[in-house]
Image (cartoon, helix red, strand yellow):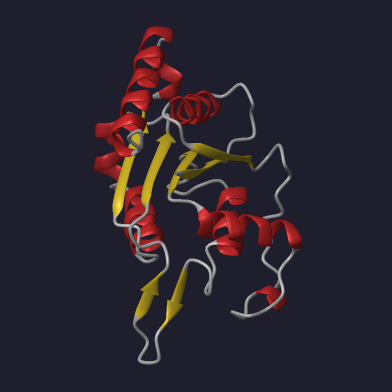
Amino acid sequence: MKVLVIIGHQNPGSFCHAIAQTAADTLRELGHEVIYHDLYQERFDPVLPHAEIPKDAPVDPVVRVHCDELRAAGGYVIVHPNWWGQPPAILKGWIDRVLRQGVAYEFAAEGAVIGHLEGKTAVVFTTSNTPRDLELKLFGDPLDNLWKNCIFGFCGARNFYRRNFESIILSTPEQRRQWLDEVRQTIRERFPSGG
């Protein structure tokens, strides 16, 4: 299967990058075709122009490639840090421009949503610095709701899994190695080998 891997972190030496690379390597080991985009390295433009909003509007050629890859992929792995309970702006802009009406979903005549990502698998790995118990007590888990319900659920991808790794700033090298082992295991479970 084709799996689209999207990393939204500005530091190539980050733990998010280690997660994304581990996921991509594991997918390849399983025989999947990986489409890998480092949004910062590629300088993806997150600004959604007004002229691009209508369903059938012409879009930037780079955005069109991303849209085509999104539709062709059988699965998605998204990796990013938790910034203020949200993805970084570059990734939010990717969502705005790529998971667009006519590509990821449609509105039926009566207003119902038709998700075009039906039957596809989505895995989201996030990182944060706030310890989990404190974060849940203070904020709940806005990223889980965003990805599971507002984005992938809305677009029909109900086979969804998210894992947040925390606290990054308090973690040890051994803990990070264990977390990367967990990433490998998650990818093996969610994207089993086809052959």
Taking the spot 68% from the left edge, 74% from the top edge, the residue there is 52
Q: Is residue 195 left or right of residue 35?
A: left
As drawn, which residue projects farthest toward the top?
174
As drawn, which residue projects farthest toward the front?
195
Indicate the position of residue 147 as horizontal and vertical percent values: 38, 53
Q: Is residue 4 above or below residue 11?
A: below
Please name whichever residue, 137 or 160, is drawn nearer the observer in this view of the structure: 160
Taking the spot 40% from the left edge, 17% from the top edge, the residue there is 170
Quadrant where the image shows the C terminus: top left
Indicate the position of residue 152 as horizontal and vertical percent values: 38, 58
Indicate the position of residue 29 as horizontal and vertical percent values: 45, 24
Taking the spot 51% from the left edge, 60% from the top edge, the residue there is 71
Please name whichever residue, 90 or 22, is drawn nearer the observer in this view of the structure: 22
Q: Is residue 32 above or below residue 85?
A: above
Indicate the position of residue 129 as horizontal and vertical percent values: 42, 29
Q: Is residue 111 left or right of residue 132?
A: right
Q: Is residue 119 left or right of residue 47?
A: left
Q: Quadrant of residue 49?
A: bottom right
Q: Is residue 101 above or below residue 64?
A: below
Q: Is residue 156 left or right of residue 83?
A: left
Taking the spot 52% from the left edge, 23% from the top edge, the residue there is 18
As drawn, which residue projects farthest toward the bottom?
110
Quadrant where the image shows the N terminus: top left
Please tell me how many numbered marks the rendered image carries. Answer: 0
